[in-house]
Amino acid sequence: MKLRDSPTGQARRTAEQGVGRTTERKVCQEVEHYEGDKVDVSKEAKDLEDERDLTVRQADRFDGGEALLEIGLVICSITLLTKRKDSG
């Protein structure tokens, strides 16, 4: 008589099958949980991407405004320097 055919071997297989079913149930529950979270996480990610895109557009506008301000300062400085030379 082999060990797996003995009552102890059968009991062990039954116990292993029970543990296998329990583990399978836990895994299925985790999969369902993460599937539900996937929709929420995707929506949140899309919202954050939209916010990032808006911020990038605003940053571009601020950079353009800063460049125009500096150009204006340079023109004013040149104007003041040339008037001093003519006056002096």
Image (cartoon, grey):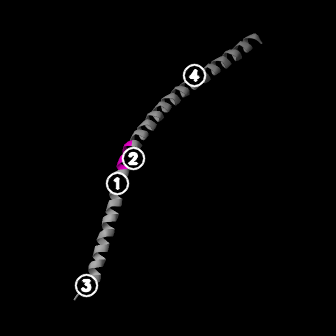
What residue is pinned by disc 1? Answer: 31
Q: CA distance from mark 2 to mark 1?
A: 10 Å
Amino acid tagged 4: Leu
What residue is pinned by disc 4? Answer: 68
Amino acid tagged 2: Asp
The magenta stretch spans which residues?
Answer: 34-39
Q: CA distance from mark 2 to mark 4?
A: 47 Å
Q: Earlier in the sequence, mark 2 or mark 3?
A: 3
Query: SS class of the residue under badge 1?
Result: helix
Q: Earlier in the sequence, mark 2 or mark 1?
A: 1
Dot label at residue 40: none
Query: SS class of the residue under badge 2?
Result: helix
Q: CA distance from mark 3 to mark 1?
A: 37 Å
What residue is pinned by disc 2? Answer: 37
Query: SS class of the residue under badge 4?
Result: helix
Q: Nearer the viewer, mark 4 or mark 1?
A: 1
What residue is pinned by disc 3? Answer: 6
Residue 84 on image: x %, y %: 74, 14
* Callout count: 4
Residue 57 on image: x %, y %: 48, 29
